[in-house]
Amino acid sequence: MTHFRQSSRLPWRLATVLFMSWFLAGCGINDIPTYDEQVKAAWGQVENQYQRRADLIPNLVETVRAYAQHERETLTAVIEARAKATSIQVDAGTLDDPQKLQQYQQAQDQLSGALSRLMVVSERYPELKANQNFLALQSQLEGTENRISVARRDFIAAVERYNTEIRTFPGRIWHGLLYRDMPVRESFEATTQGAEQAPQVQFR
């Protein structure tokens, strides 16, 4: 009889466990770590697109130099800005550091400014503007800038969703109980070997 009673209780215990799992999932207990992973994934895309841009710069500088050797100051500024931008790394471990994130963004913005000045300089050289390699690089650069904008927008949206979750009910409760080590995030790794080094460009 005792064995029968114990056996009859097993389905009820199993049902209780399944119900509690469903209930907790429905209450959003997993939302915070899920949104946290989405933030990290979105940041990875931001890094990827900035790295894609950095990878285009050595060829771009070489192409411009071939037609505009007198623009030494502008070319040097691009090289130095690239070196600085690729030397600052913000990965999942430092994504919660507002100062590091600001330094990263400032360096990328400086590189954007240097590239803009380089594009202005290219307007002075008709042969450069007609060069097929330059036109291809310019097109790739423009496409990459667009992808950077999209990646940054997606990152900002992911951070907003994460921050909203831990500040509102019921996420605020789960944050206080289970996820205290996951802070509010600021809204706004290099992938290529040697990206931290400036491209070697010899001026003649």
Image: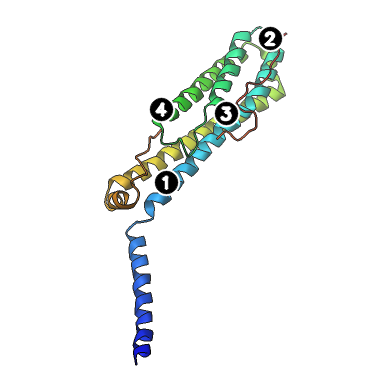
Residue at image mark 2: 69
**Which residue appears at 52% of the width and 22% of the height?**
112
User: What kind of residue is marked 1?
Assistant: Asp
Residue situated furthest front in the rendering: 2
Residue at image mark 1: 36
Q: Secondary structure at mark 2?
A: loop
Residue at image mark 4: 99
The relative height of residue 30 versus residue 64 in the rendered view (above or below) is below
User: What kind of residue is marked 4?
Assistant: Gln
Decide if residue 190 is on the left or right side of residue 179: right
Q: Position of residue 99 (x, y in %)?
A: 41, 27
- Of marks 2 and 1, which one's residue comes earlier in the chain? 1
Q: Is residue 88 visible?
A: yes
Q: Secondary structure at mark 4?
A: helix
Q: Secondary structure at mark 3?
A: helix
Residue at image mark 3: 142
Observer-side mark, 1 or 4, equals 4
Q: How many C-alpha atoms fall within 10 Å of the one at disc 1: few (<14), some, or many (≥20)?
A: some
- Of marks 2 and 3, which one's residue comes earlier in the chain? 2
Decide if residue 42 is on the left or right side of residue 204: left
The relative height of residue 36 versus residue 146 in the rendered view (above or below) is below
Residue 2 versus residue 63: which sits nearer the camera?
A: 2
Q: Secondary structure at mark 1?
A: helix
